[in-house]
Amino acid sequence: MTEHIQADHPNTNATDDSRKKLLSVRDLKVYFDIFPKGAMPWTKPRKLKAVNGVSFDLYEGETLGVVGESGCGKSTLARAVIRMLPVEGGEVVWLGQDLAPLKDKAMRNHRKDIQMIFQDPLASLNPRMTIGQIIAEPLQTHYPELGKAEVKERVAEMMKTVGLLPNQINRYPHEFSGGQCQRIGIARALILKPKLIICDEPVSALDVSIQAQVINLLMSLQKKMGLSLIFIAHDLSVVKHISTRIMVLYLGNVMEVADAADIYRQPRHPYTQALISAVPIPDPKIERNKEVILIEGDLPSPINPPSGCVFRTRCPKADAKCAEHKPELVYSKGTHQVACHYHD
């Protein structure tokens, strides 16, 4: 699929200090109370640590790719950033304003700047509304003073921007393919002209050829509108092409953060090395001869995570130090950050 994705990328090095910092997340924690089956009302709940102390920055015009296997906290992190989930602790600073303590009314003023594209394109659309109504809904919520004619004009223009025909404005979601439904979701997210789009696995439910079209559309819109993206995906090939930087999550913890090219060329954390080794290579000869690093065992429960390094139960380098001390996310080389005692 990657050979159909545009090679050029509009983003530059996100670590340039001259660039504007849009989002700063510090020590973000998202815990859920879990009660055992048949528990009495007075039973104390156990804490499921879905996101456990994640920190990162996002700069203007860049794409931060977020990768990791299922259950690592990617989607929970995304929903916590936009306050769709309550947080246990930490800060989510958007343009200098901490969003975590804001009430719903105060938070609404920021929602037009941060929008989200969801994984299942059809399930994220109201089947009882036409696509014109779906795309117009954010405008009616945040700009109720707009007249019907102006709303319709903006919706039609946005439909053309994402590759939909204006004469489809009165059709319903079930009349469209999965790729077209995702374009509707993109149009709805962009109609408010936000600064940040959070893409929660936006292409995982689509066919391979359609995935490339949607990725190319997002990259084109990013360049045209000056967007910043947080792009969540399982497909590391897609993440490599669209991302400026990549953050690797495991069991709610950050394992590694680096520029996309650096993390593919020289991954430093054992978990990242295993993920990169599993990425298919288009050359059959190289693919047959490459070394694949297998991760043994299953993902531990976030209710009872391992002591020390959370990856130690599956890591070939783990020793007693890994069980006793949790590694800090430190700079390994340049802007490359790794949370591993033996990253060198």
Image: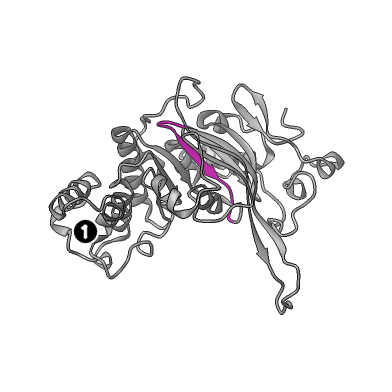
In this orientation, does residue 151 appear? yes
- Residue closest to the eye, 33 or 342: 33
User: Picture coordinates of residue 224 (x, y %)?
Assistant: 28, 34
Task: Provide the residue span drawn in magenta.
Answer: 59-70
In the rendered view, tell whether residue 125 sits above or below residue 110: below
- Residue closest to the eye, 132 or 287: 132
- Residue closest to the eye, 236 or 168: 168
Q: Is residue 63 magenta?
A: yes
Q: Which residue is labeled 1 in the image?
A: 132
Rendering quarter of residue 238:
top left
Seen at 55% across and 49% down, the residue is 77
Seen at 46% across and 40% down, the residue is 282
Q: Is residue 90 magenta?
A: no
User: Picture coordinates of residue 150 (x, y %)?
Assistant: 15, 49
In the rendered view, tell whether residue 256 sits above or below residue 108: above
Seen at 46% across and 42% down, the residue is 230
Colour basis = one colour
User: Picture coordinates of residue 234 (x, y %)?
Assistant: 51, 49
Q: Is residue 165 left or right of residue 340?
A: left
Seen at 12% across and 52% down, the residue is 149
In this orientation, does residue 115 appear? no
Residue furthest to the right in view is 320
Q: Is residue 253 left or right of residue 191?
A: right
Q: Is residue 40 left or right of residue 18?
A: right
Q: Secondary structure at mark 1?
A: helix
Kind of residue sitting beneath label 1: Gly
